[in-house]
Amino acid sequence: MEQKGPDLVIILLTGKENPKRLPSAFFLASTAAAEDMNVVIYFTGPATELLKKGVADSIYPMEGGQPLSYFIHTL
């Protein structure tokens, strides 16, 4: 059986040092997934810190807005 590769690959380099840029990767991934595309997000460099338990819950891209974990879980 032939495996199909991803339709979209997102490489996330930004970490908690630049919280306003973080939701974009998840918006793009959600939009592509809604169109039945196979999406892969690679976390590299500072972005790997986002994968630690509780970190995404403590980052707010906009003051008074949702935490980063909200955008991750909408995928």
Image (cartoon, rainbow, N blue to C red):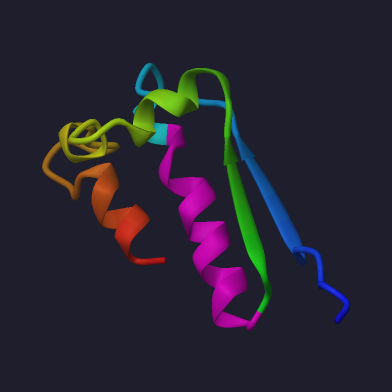
Residue 27 in percent (x, y) is at 48, 58
Residue displayed at 42% across by 46% down: 23
Q: Main secondary structure of the magenta part?
A: helix
Q: Position of residue 57 (x, y in %)?
A: 18, 40
Query: Which of the pair 54/31 is nearer the observer?
Result: 54
Range shown magenta: 21-36
Answer above or below: position of 27 versus 10: below
Give me the residue at 30% from left, 30% from top.
52
Residue 11: quarter of image: top right
Quick check: can you spot residue 63? yes
For residue 3, which quarter of the picture?
bottom right
Q: Does residue 7 sit above or below 9 in this rendering? A: below
Judge whether 23 appears above or below 53 on screen: below
Kindly indicate the quadrant of the structure image that contains residue 1: bottom right
Foreground of the two, 11 or 23? 11
Left/right placement of residue 58 relative to residue 29 reads left
Q: Is residue 15 visible?
A: no
* Rendering coords of residue 31 (x, y %): 55, 70
Viewer-closest of 63 and 27: 27
Residue at the front extreme of this rendering: 1
Total count of labels: 0
In the rendered image of this protein, does residue 22 appear above or below residue 45? below
Farthest left residue in view: 64
- Identity of the residue drawn at 38% across and 24% down: 49
Q: Residue at x 18, y 35 (%)?
A: 54
Residue 31 magenta-highlighted? yes
Residue 17 picture location, percent across and down = 38, 16
Quick one: quadrant of the C terminus?
bottom left
Is residue 18 left or right of 8 when viewed as pictured? Answer: left
User: Does residue 9 appear to the left or right of 34 in the view shown?
Assistant: right
